[in-house]
Amino acid sequence: MNAVEVLQNGGLIIYPTDTVYGIGCDLYNKGALQRIYTLKKKSKFDPVSIIVKDIQQASLYARISNYAFKIMKHCLPGPYTFILPSTREIPKTMLSKRKEVGIRIPDNEVCHTLIENMNHPLVNTSVNMNPDELLNDPEEIERRYQNSVDMMLDADWLHEAHESTVVSLINDEVVILREGKGDVQKLFE
């Protein structure tokens, strides 16, 4: 069974991104989404992001103003997560009280291939269990999650692994929520 089949059957996979290893599931599979929340010890009100193939696909799931579009176009694909108002396409099971969604467009071929073959976004969260942790050893990741996920796509140690830079673009205001791998200065160029 390949990774797309695992996702389509409600499974969880671990895969490389342009930042860190991520855990993902089918956006429209409520059971798989609940498994991610349980695994990461999150409530449905804790944010998770989605990986999309491009800004055009992102616009189906998030309301993107002209201002936000210019910033995203300049920075993506890349190591950024942009927080935007969600559209009705985001399942209610993953909406926070503020009805916002994190959008990721990684510069990573594995992510692009998964999204291309799924025909819709993947729910995405990092394998890290807390902000101070950076798991990058595939053997350690596999050992930790062997009974919790259905497949791991091992890409060895990720070069320059670091979490994404998280940026809110709500109300056309740039608010940096977490400084990560994405260069903050690029947001203002």
Image (cartoon, grey):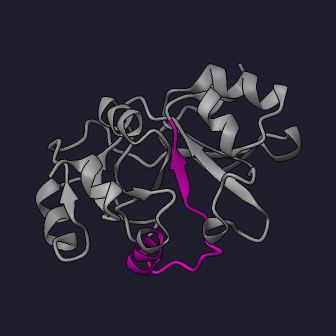
* x and y percentages locating residue 12 in the rendered image: 31, 63
Q: Compared with residue 40, is residue 89 higher up or lower down, i.e. above or below? A: above
State the residue in front, 87 or 131: 87
Residue beneath the point at 55% across and 61% down:
48
In the image, the segment drawn in magenta is 33-52
What is the x, y in percent for residue 138? Answer: 16, 54
The location of residue 13, given as percent across then percent down, is: 28, 58
Q: Residue at x 79, y 65 (%)?
A: 98
Looking at this view, is 57 or 177 the one in front?
Answer: 57
Q: Quadrant location of residue 97?
A: bottom right
Q: Is residue 7 magenta?
A: no
Check the image and report above or below for 35 versus 58.
below
Q: Nearer the viewer, residue 185 or 137?
A: 137
Residue 147 is left or right of residue 186, and the answer is left
State the image coordinates of residue 181 (x, y, percent, origin top left): 47, 39
In what quadrant of the picture does the C terminus appear? top right
Q: Is residue 188 visible?
A: no
Question: Quick check: 134 above or below 93?
Answer: above
